[in-house]
Image: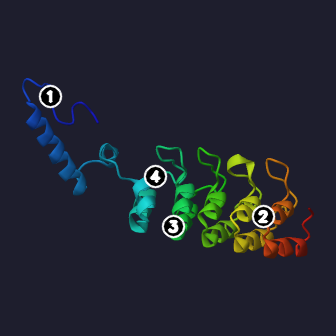
Amino acid sequence: MSPHFFPQCSNTRRHPLHLRWAFVAILAGALSWGIVAPAHAQLFGGGLVDDVKNDDLASAYGHLAEGKNANGKNADGTPMLVLAAQLNHVQMGRLLISKGARTSEKDAQGDTALTAAIRRGSTEFAKMLLDHKADPNLSGANGETPIIVAIVMGNASAVRALIDAKADLDAGDYTGRTPLAEAVRRGYRGIVEMLKKAGAQE
């Protein structure tokens, strides 16, 4: 905030502490009525991060229309689309993508929105991402491909969606284990049969 926003606010001799807090309260009220420029809103939190967390589509649309970056990140380095995936906010994910969010963005752990959605158990979110041309082979945290993540989670519907999206069925994880080998190791017979029918090699 500009030091001249409230003249001489920093002069504690002329403006006692309780008066400076009164100025803050006035500013907060001005923000709620839209009187203060949006650039000052960050002092009070809020913004697109909160919109995504709260699944507030109307507010998110407004912030994006004002120029907020759909590829922005929260304080932990999590991209907005990955955050939406972690929370299973499918419509928010669609909105972010429509405003330019990249499905290839990763969080601090290395997860994409696709691998985050699969870990969350949201096949609907995963399918939405694949419908928007998310890379079905782009690895997430620990170098795990989406299909490996789906197998680890025992999510047969996500495995099916990835097969339909032409995921590489023979790409190994960071240990070199293939999807079929991982499914066999975990005893997921249904997934094993699905992979074999799709042409996967152990």
Residue 8 tag number: 1
Horizontal arrangement in the rendering, residue 189 relative to residue 139 (left or right): right
Give the residue displayed 6% in from the left and 26% down from the top: 14
Q: Quadrant of residue 85?
A: bottom right
Q: How far is the residue under mark 1 from the one under mark 4?
A: 32 Å
Per the image, label 3 sits on a secondary structure element best described as loop
Find residue 21 and report its image quarter.
top left
Tell me: 60 left or right of 95: left
Q: Is residue 23 above or below residue 170?
A: above
Disc 4 from disc 2: Cα separation: 44 Å
Find disc 3 in the rendering and name its residue. Answer: 89
| Mark seen at residue 186 | 2
Give the residue at mark 4: 68
x, y percent for residue 172: 84, 53
Residue 162 x/y as whole percent: 76, 68
The CA distance from mark 4 to mark 3 is: 19 Å
Q: Quadrant of residue 152?
A: bottom right
Which numbered disc flags the more N-terminal residue, 2 or 1? 1
Q: In the rendered structure, which disc, 3 or 1, sits on the residue that comes first in sequence?
A: 1
Which badge, 2 or 3, comes first in the chain's sequence?
3
Dividing the image into 4 quarters, which one contains the N terminus? top left
Q: Give the amino acid type for the residue marked by disc 4 in the picture.
A: Lys
Q: Position of residue 121 (x, y in %)?
A: 61, 67
**How many angstroms separate mark 2 from mark 1 (CA)?**
68 Å
Task: State the SS at label 2.
Answer: helix
The numbered mark, 4 or 2, whose residue comes first in the sequence reads: 4
Q: Residues within 10 Å of mark 3 (few under 14, many from 20)?
A: many
**At numbered mark 4, what does the secondary structure look like: helix, strand or loop?**
loop
Do tag 3 and tag 1 residues touch (Cβ < 8 Å)?
Answer: no
